[in-house]
Amino acid sequence: MIEVSNLVKKYGDFIAVQGISFKVEKGEILGLLGPNGAGKSTTMKILSAFMPATSGTARVAGFDVFEEPFEVKKRVGYLPENPPLYIEMRVREYLEYVADLKHLEKSRKKERVDYVIDRCGLGDNQKRIIATMSKGFKQRVGIAQALVHDPEVVILDEPTVGLDPVQIVEIRNLIKGLAGNHTVILSTHILPEVVMTCGKVVLINHGKVMVDDTVDTLTRGDTLEQAYLKIVTGESLAHTQH
Amino acid sequence: MFFKNISTMFKREFRAYFYTPLAYVFIGMFVFFMGIMFNSFLQNYLNYMQASAYQMGAQITIDRLAEAFYANMHVILMIMIPFFTMRLFTSESSQGTFALLMTSPIRTIELVIAKFAGAATIVLIMLGMTVIFPIFLFAFSDKSAQSPGPDMGIVGATYLGLVLISFTYVAIGTFWSSITESQLIALVFTFFNIFFLWLLSLWAQSTSGGVQATLQQMAVNEQFMSFSRGTLELKSFVIFLSYIIFYLFLTNRSIESRAWRS
Ligand SMILES: Nc1ncnc2c1ncn2[C@@H]1O[C@H](COP(=O)(O)OP(=O)(O)OP(=O)(O)O)[C@@H](O)[C@H]1O
Ligand SMILES: [Mg+2]
C-alpha cells in the first residue's frame, strides 16, 4: 500500500532524508519514530504528495506520488504538524468543505461528517468558530479533516499532541479501529502510544532508517523505550538510564 | 471536475469576505464615497444647467461630467482593490491551510481562478451598487435638449471598462499575494504595480512615435478612458484580457513553485 525506496530530500545543501526505504502493507499501522529533526515530517510531506522528493520513489495507494500526485491525493488523508484550519469557519462547515475538496460523494457527506464529528469528540462544538477553540480541540478538528473522506491511506503527523488524557485514549482507539480497512502512518514521540496502536515501527535518525521491525519483536527483550534509547543514543547511555 | 473544484473553492473564498465585518465596512465606505461624489456631480450639473440658460454654447455636457465622475470611481477602486486581494494567498500560508489545498485533488490553476473569482465578485457587487446613480440621473432628466440625461450607451461602455480594469487590478493583487506570506507586502507591491501601470500613460506623454503608442496601449487607464468616452474597441478588450491572463498565469507559476520549495 505504501512503498518507499531510496527517498532523498534536500533543503538546499542540507540533506534531511538520506535514502530511506520501507514498506507498509494494506491495513497496517506504522509508527514513524525518531528524534527531533530526524526527518519524519519531511517524509510524511512527501508521502502525502505535498512536496516532491529530491530523488527516490514512493508509491502510495498504488500510485507514484511524483508521477500521479492527483491520484494519491484523492486517496490520502493528511494531518500536518500544524492542523490546516480555516479558523474563521465553523467546525462543521469546515469539515464539509474538506469533504468537497477531497471529492467525497454527496450522498456520503452528511454521514461521514457526522461520523468524524462524533468520533473526534466534536459533537458539542460543531457550530463553533474554530478560532475560538482551544489547542486540543483544534487538533481534533485536524484529525477529523484527515479522516472525513474515508481515505485508504491516513498520514498523521503527531496526532495526539495537545489532547487531554481522555481524548488521547479515544483518538488511539479511533486510529486502532482504522487498521484493516485503512493503512496508517503516524509519527509520535510518545512510545507507549506506539506499543498501543501500531503493529510496525520505522525508526529514523538523521534521515536514515535505523530500525524497521514489528512492535512485538522490538519489545521482546526490552521495553520500546530501552530499545529506542539504545538505537538513538547508543548502548552505554541506555544502561546508565536503567 | 474542473468547474466543480473551482466552484467549491470559489464559494469558500466569497464567504470568507463576510466572516469579518471588514468587507461590509469597505463596501459601505465605497458606496458612501461614491454618494458624496455623486452629490458634487449633481451640484456641478445643476450649476452648468443654470449657467447654460444664460450663455448659450457652454462646452460641458452631462456626459463629460459623468466621465469625470467615473474617473474618480476608478481612482477609488485603484485604492480599494489591493485591500481585497492582499489576504488571498497570504492567509493560506499563515494558517497552514496551504498544506490542505496542496494535498487535495485540485489543480493549482483551479485554486488561482477560484481566488481571483472570489475577489472579482466582491468588486462586481461594489460596481453593481453604483448603477443606481446613472439610473437615477436618467429617470429624473426630462430628456429634453436642455436636460438630456446621460447617454446610457456611454454609461454601459464605462461600466464594461470599469469591470475590465478592476479585474486587471484584482489579477495583479492575486499575483502579489501569492509571492509573499505578508499581507502588508502584498498590499504595497500591488499598489506599486497598479501605480506603475498608471505611470505608463504619463511617461507616454513625454515620448513620441512608436514608443508613445506602445506605452499608451499598455497603460490600462488609457484603455479605460476610451471606454468611458463610449469607444468600444476589440483592441482594448484584448489588452485587458492579456493583463488578466498574464498575471493569473504568473500566480499559477508562483503557487506551483511554492509547493516545490516548502
Ligand atoms: N523548509 C525547510 N527548509 C530547510 N530545512 C528544513 C525545512 N523543513 C525541515 N528542515 C530540516 O529538515 C530536518 C528534518 O525536519 P523534519 O521536520 O522532517 O523533522 P521531524 O523528524 O519531523 O522532527 P520533529 O520531531 O521535531 O517534528 C530538520 O533538520 C529541519 O531543520
Ligand atoms: Mg515533525
Image: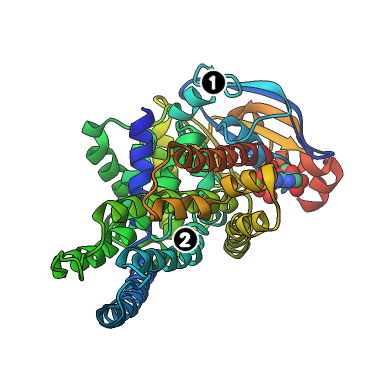
Where A73 sits versus A161, above or below? above
Q: Secondary structure at mark 1?
A: loop
Q: Nearer the viewer, residue B142 or A184?
A: B142
- Closer to viewer: mark 1 or mark 2: 2
Q: Secondary structure at mark 2?
A: helix
Question: Considering the image in quadrants, where does the C terminus of chain B appear?
Answer: top right
Amino acid at circle 1: Glu
Q: Is residue A195 left or right of residue B133?
A: right
Quarter occupied by residue A97: top left
- Label 2 environment density (alpha carbons within 10 Å; few <14, some 14–19, many ≥20): many
Q: What number is the disc on residue B11?
A: none
Residue A64 x/y as whole percent: 58, 19
Q: Nearer the viewer, residue B214 or B49?
A: B49
Decide: marks 1, 2 in contact (CB < 8 A)? no
Where B97 sits versus A8, above or below? below
Q: Is residue B56 left or right of residue B107?
A: left
Q: Is residue B52 left or right of residue A183?
A: left
Which residue is tagged 1? A68
Residue at the limit of the structure toward the top, as seen here: A62
Chain to which the residue tagged by mark 2 belongs: B
**Ligand 1 falls in quadrant:** top right
